[in-house]
Structure formats: structure tokens, C-alpha cells
């Protein structure tokens, strides 16, 4: 890891070349926030490549704006359709999964920002880690599904895995205040979503539009629905378990509706260190790109007077039972995270399409988690098999 840190540090230094960056999921919410950070600190970075699924025109526009050397569409048909719009001087256009994997492993790349949504991002995350890159990880599903595999690959290659989820970035920052043996527990904060304070009987008929109306964060559809069910926090418990190598019993979740305290760490002497800031993903992204330094940012700024009251509540797991599933999967390990995540992806998709009520998301995930063909020490093939099995089971159940 020291070699990776030294190489990255040399590129980031005043005398070095700009660091080569790849952004996966470039046209999504994380990708757009990353683009803003890269523009803000343009002299420090060189955009080696941008990757998206099917959004060709948006990817090309972003590539031109950032001066990207390559743009890659995972969908080959979308890339074929984009070819006619290419002009001299545009980024090189490539397509398909092999092009994505070649890009993240390129010698010209120092850091990969993983902003892809869902378990589909796992293979690229693993490729980046195996190639010894700094992985700025916003795709929590990679760690939820295959945390031990990613950690083992990072240890072998010297790669760095730095969290971009706001809560895990906060924990990462807070943990700098003490050593591993000084940590008593990690405290993840949750906004509570749009239905905080509601009872279970009032949620049976909620619509996708209501669930997508998040009170504090601007996120993609899946993560916004997961915030409404608290499944997002369930997955973050699993992510924290593997990112920080900590037992689930030492992880706690509290509801903090203002979304200003992004998470906290309690140390053995009773001290609690919290990381605070406006609910803006550019902060965690900037920190993952700059660590162990901090880049100056003009915006957003934090003003205490704007937040005269910060409150914390115990989660209502009777109304939002999804949270308990995260602790269950974190305790079981193995293939449990893969099963839970796959079931949730399918359940959210079915809810958004009108095929499943909001109140049916958590029970469907619970059934899939508890009935899946569990393996305690899975290979990547085992994880992909369970992922496919869980998706099929969840789709059949709908």
C-alpha cells in the first residue's frame, strides 16, 4: 500500500503529472458530482475515461466537457448509435464490458471512482483493486456482495479502497482520531427518509413518487427508495462491517433527519468524534480523491447558525424491518449480502413499476435472504450464482 500511496502522491504533487482518473457511472448522480469536483480541481487530474451504461449523448457531452481521453458505453448498441455523432477531437469511443475492464486496469489510471448503481459494478470494482488502483467506492453493493474478496485482492495488489458513501467517508475521517483498539463502536446516521414517523399501516398504499421525494438528499431512484425503507442503511451496515473489519455488534444506526452529522465513532474512553457538513456528495468524493490531504473547496460551506437544532432518534424497526436484515446478513457473512442485495434490487424495480407494494419490499427481501443457498466462504462464482438465484426468486415471488 505504501507503494500505491507514494505513486499517487507523486502524481498529485506540485512537480508531478495530474493523476489519471476513470469515472464509472459517469452520467449518474455520483458521476455528475464527481465531474463537478474534477472541474473544480482541474489541474490535479487527467480524465482518462468515463463509463456509462446506455446514456450515450450525455456521456459524450460530459467527455467533451472534461476533456476525457476515452468514453465507454457498456451497451454496444448504444455505442453504435452514438458513432454518427462523433467529431474529430472527441474522446475515443469504446463499448462492452471488456473495454470497461481494460480501462480500469490501464497503467495510465491512478484512481477509479466507482459510481455504478447495483451489483453490476462488482466486476469492475474487483478489476480496479486487482490492478492496484485507488478505488473511490460509491457502489456500496461491491462491498456488500463481496467485501472479503475485495479486501483480499487489495492486500495482494496494494490497492486502496476509500469510501465515498457519505456515512462511510465520515467514519473513515473520524477513525483518524484513534487506533483500532481504541474504537468502541461505529454510529451510522440515517435521515429516516420521506416516511419517518409514519406507522406501518399508513405505508401500504404509498406511491413511487412519494417514496422518491427524499427530504434532504438528491440521489438515484434505487438508493432513494432504499432510504425510504431503511434498506439503504441495512446495506451500509454490511458495508461498514467489511470496510472497517468490525463486528456487527459494534455498529449502531441512529436516525438524524437533518443529515448534517454524517456518522460518528465512539472511542473506549467515552469520547465521540462526529463528521459534519452539508448533505452534498462532493465532499466525500473530494476527500477520496485528495486523501491523505484535503483539497480546499469554495462550496458548500458549513455555518453553525443554519443548524440550531440537531436531533437523533432510535430507528423504528417495526415499521421499517429492512434495517434488521442488514444486521442479519452482516452477522452471517458469506453469501448473505449477495442474496439480500439482489432481492432488494428486484423488489425496488418491481415497486417502481407498480408490481409490488411498498410494504412488500422488506418481506420479499427477508424471504429471499433466509431461503437462499447459503455458502459461508464463497468464491466469486458462488456470489454470482447466488445473485442470479436471488433475482429469479424475487421476480417469481412478484
Image: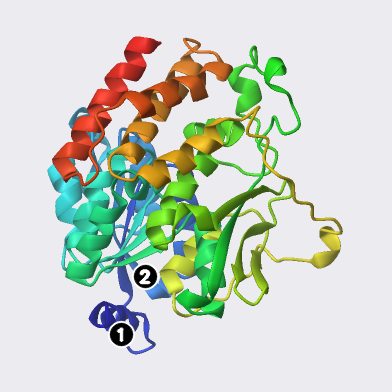
In the image, taking residue 174 as reference, residue 98 lies left or right, namely: left
Residue drawn at (22%, 34%) of the image: 84
Q: Secondary structure at mark 1?
A: helix
**Label 2–label 1 contact, CB within 8 A:** no
Instruction: Please tell me how many numbered marks the rendered image carries.
Output: 2
- Closer to the chain start, of discs 2 and 1, is 1
**Residue sitting nearer the eye, 102 or 316:** 316
Q: In the rendered image, which residue does mark 2 sit on?
A: 45
Q: Residue at x 57, y 76 (%)?
A: 296
Marks 2/1: CA–CA distance: 12 Å
Viewer-closest of 317 and 294: 317
The quadrant of the rendering that contains the C terminus is top left
Q: Residue at x 63, y 34 (%)?
A: 317
Instruction: Indicate whether 46 appears above or below 86.
Output: below
> Quick check: 93 left or right of 162?
left
**Residue in the image at 60% along x and 74% along y:** 268
Q: Nearer the viewer, mark 2 or mark 1?
A: 1
Please provide percent x and percent y for residue 301: 70, 66
According to the image, label 1 marks what residue? 10
Amino acid at each position: 500500500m505504501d507503494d500505491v500511496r507514494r505513486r499517487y502522491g507523486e502524481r498529485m504533487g506540485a512537480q508531478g503529472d495530474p493523476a489519471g482518473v476513470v469515472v464509472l457511472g459517469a452520467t449518474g448522480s455520483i458521476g455528475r458530482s464527481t465531474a463537478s469536483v474534477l472541474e473544480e480541481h482541474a489541474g490535479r487530474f487527467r480524465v482518462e475515461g468515463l463509463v456509462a451504461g446506455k446514456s450515450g449523448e450525455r456521456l459524450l457531452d460530459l467527455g467533451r466537457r472534461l476533456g476525457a481521453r476515452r468514453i465507454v458505453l457498456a451497451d454496444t448498441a448504444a455505442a453504435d448509435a452514438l458513432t454518427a455523432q462523433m467529431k474529430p477531437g472527441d474522446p475515443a469511443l469504446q463499448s462492452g464490458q471488456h473495454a470497461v475492464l481494460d480501462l480500469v486496469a490501464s497503467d495510465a489510471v491512478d484512481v477509479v471512482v466507482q459510481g455504478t448503481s447495483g451489483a453490476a459494478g462488482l466486476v469492475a470494482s474487483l478489476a480496479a483493486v486487482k490492478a492496484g488502483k485507488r478505488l473511490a467506492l460509491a457502489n456500496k453493493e461491491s462491498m456488500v456482495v463481496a467485501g472479503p474478496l475485495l479486501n483480499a485482492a487489495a492486500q495482494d495488489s496494494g490497492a486502496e479502497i476509500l469510501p465515498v458513501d457519505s456515512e462511510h467517508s465520515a467514519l473513515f475521517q473520524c477513525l483518524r482520531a484513534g487506533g483500532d483498539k481504541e474504537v468502541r463502536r461505529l454510529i451510522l446516521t440515517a435521515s429516516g427518509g420521506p416516511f419517518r414517523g409514519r406507522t406501518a399501516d399508513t405505508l401500504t398504499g404509498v406511491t413511487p413518487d412519494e417514496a422518491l421525494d427524499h427530504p434532504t438528499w438528491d440521489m438515484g431512484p434505487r438508493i432513494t427508495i432504499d432510504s425510504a425503507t431503511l434498506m439503504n442503511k441495512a446495506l451500509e451496515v454490511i458495508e461498514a462491517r467489511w470496510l472497517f473489519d468490525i463486528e456487527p455488534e459494534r455498529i449502531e444506526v441512529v436516525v438524524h433527519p437533518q443529515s448534517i452529522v454524517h456518522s460518528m465513532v465512539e472511542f473506549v474512553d467515552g469520547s465521540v468524534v462526529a463528521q459534519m457538513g452539508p448533505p452534498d456528495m462532493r465532499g466525500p468524493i473530494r476527500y477520496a480523491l485528495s486523501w491523505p490531504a484535503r483539497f480546499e473547496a469554495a462550496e458548500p460551506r458549513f455555518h453553525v447558525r443554519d443548524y440550531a437544532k440537531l436531533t437523533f432518534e432510535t430507528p423504528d424497526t417495526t415499521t421499517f424491518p429492512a434495517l434488521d436484515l442488514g444486521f442479519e446478513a452482516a452477522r452471517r457473512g458469506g453469501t448473505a449480502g449477495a442474496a439480500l442485495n439482489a432481492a432488494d434490487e428486484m423488489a425496488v424495480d418491481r415497486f417502481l413499476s407498480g408490481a409490488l407494494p411498498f410494504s412488500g419490499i422488506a418481506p420479499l427481501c427477508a424471504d429471499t435472504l433466509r431461503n437462499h443457498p447459503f455458502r459461508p466462504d464463497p468464491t466469486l462464482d458462488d456470489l454470482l450464482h447466488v445473485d442470479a438465484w436471488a433475482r429469479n426468486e424475487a421476480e417469481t415471488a412478484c
